[in-house]
Amino acid sequence: MSTAERHDSSSLDATALGADIAQGVTTALAAMQQAVDRVAARNPKINAACGMQTETGLQLAQALDDELAALTPEARLAQLNARPFLGVPTLLKDLGTAALGLPSAMGSVLYGHVEWTVDAEIVKRYRRAGLIPFGRTTSAELGLSPTTESPAYGPPTQNPWKAGHSAGGSSGGAGAALASGMVRIAHGSDGGGSIRIPASCCGVLGLKPSRGLMPLGPLKGEGWGGLATEHMMTLSVRDCAASLDISAGADVGAPYAAPALPKDSYRAVVARVAADPHAAARRRIAFINTTYEGAAIHPEVAATVDEAARFFAALGHELVPAAPPVGSEEVLSPMLPLIASAAANAIDSFVAARGRRLAADELQPTTLGAREYARAISGAQYVACVDTCHEITRRIGRFLHRDGAQGHDLFLCPVLALPPAAIGRYAMDNADYLAYRLGKKGVIGYSPFAPLANLTGMPAISIPFGMSSDGLPIGIQVMGPLGSEALLLELAAQVEILRPWALVAPMAR
């Protein structure tokens, strides 16, 4: 990536826009109108935004401007502590995150138009922080794919860096909406890499938080048996930290206690690195440029990880070639029954509640295959898979437990084993669910790395770092033990400051 292609991320920060609105440099209505106009101009080529509620967004923005007009300049600025995204337009992923006035299709023809009667707790926290959701972003059907090509939205979602290539999935719409400049911040969810994969494909920042850190109520206690969570995808580390500050923490009735938060804030962690990126504590980082088993991956992806290892070593971190004690299929095998069972339950519950039968053309072949596969799973088999996940988690916990000269603080690897795939390569047209995931041409060869963080519940972040010879982004992933979000943000901030990534994809220029 040439220096000329790199940009100061602060110019596109969502928090910077919130500060401008608070200071009267611009208005919430102007910011919303600009976002609406960008979606209208760019979405026809990319197909990342859906379920747009333009008038609602404009009305909410005007209401906020009216509220701010009644305040003194000092009072307006004082709001930024609790409301760092004051008046910032955003889009929510079109999956299971409930939001009043923002219907969902769940990435599926079957669901079509689901109206919500409540805001999810995370949406309440977003609104309290000043964010104004005005639409949705495209998703893989029920979140089951690493690409976003659902017939529910018409054409596949395009990668803004190069037409004909996937934006990733299942939060592909969020990644593409950010990379194309439609919005500065967009919500995603991640049950097997669904934030980190599109972040890598689209050259944006994507953090999967620790299990229990993000609220999932009031309609659910966990997603996919504890594999899934939610967070904002961003263009900058500052915005990632700020969105954690305003949303992290268990909600009432949560089945898990949230990991401990920083003593001050995630924003303060990032600010300290920004003040002196060379002063951050040195970490012991295990890394690989192959699969867990040592098999070769795409040379450009391997070279990107090698370059990242050299970058971190030059900053004083201790880089140790070491693979976690696990295999790629060993990770996915106990996860797939949990994922398929969750999908089958969601489908059957939806159909039963409407008192009708499921038509075969209402779901993609792979989704139908997942439903059939789930029906053959016994309760005992399901529990055995959970037990296997816990055993692997203990193993990885020891790998990422620093005890003097033993263990590691963090683990560096690719996000994907290949650059962003061509559209159609991982389309959900294979009715054999296991073959789609684990077969010779299955998803496992493309995404062997991301699922481990979901199985263990540990946090992992996708950081833009390289570009393929075809001009497509390549991300690196850093994973840490439960509750280590601050460490991941430190490393991401060092990259952002000392090796900034491009922010404007070609299709948005």
Image (cartoon, rainbow, N blue to C red):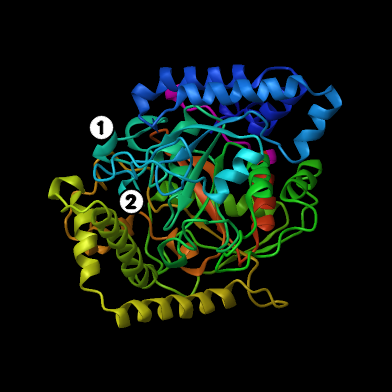
Above or below, 262 relative to 139: below
The residue beneath circle 2 is 142
- Please say whether residue 509 is visible from this viewpoint: no
Q: Give percent across and percent down for residue 482.
A: 61, 67
- For this view, does 247 lie left or right of residue 428? right
- For this view, does 283 lie left or right of residue 36? right
The residue beneath circle 1 is 154
- Outermost residue, left side: 360
- Please say whether residue 201 is visible from this viewpoint: yes
Answer whether residue 498 is magenta in the image: yes
The residue at the point 54 percent across, 18 percent down is 34
Q: Give SS at disc 1.
A: loop
Overall secondary structure of the magenta section: loop
The residue at the point 30 percent across, 56 percent down is 443
**Disc 1 marks which amino acid?**
Gly
Answer whether residue 197 is magenta in the image: no
The residue at the point 53 percent across, 29 percent down is 183
> Neighbour class for label 2 at 10 Å: few (<14), some, many (≥20)?
many
Give the extent of the magenta segment. Answer: 497-509
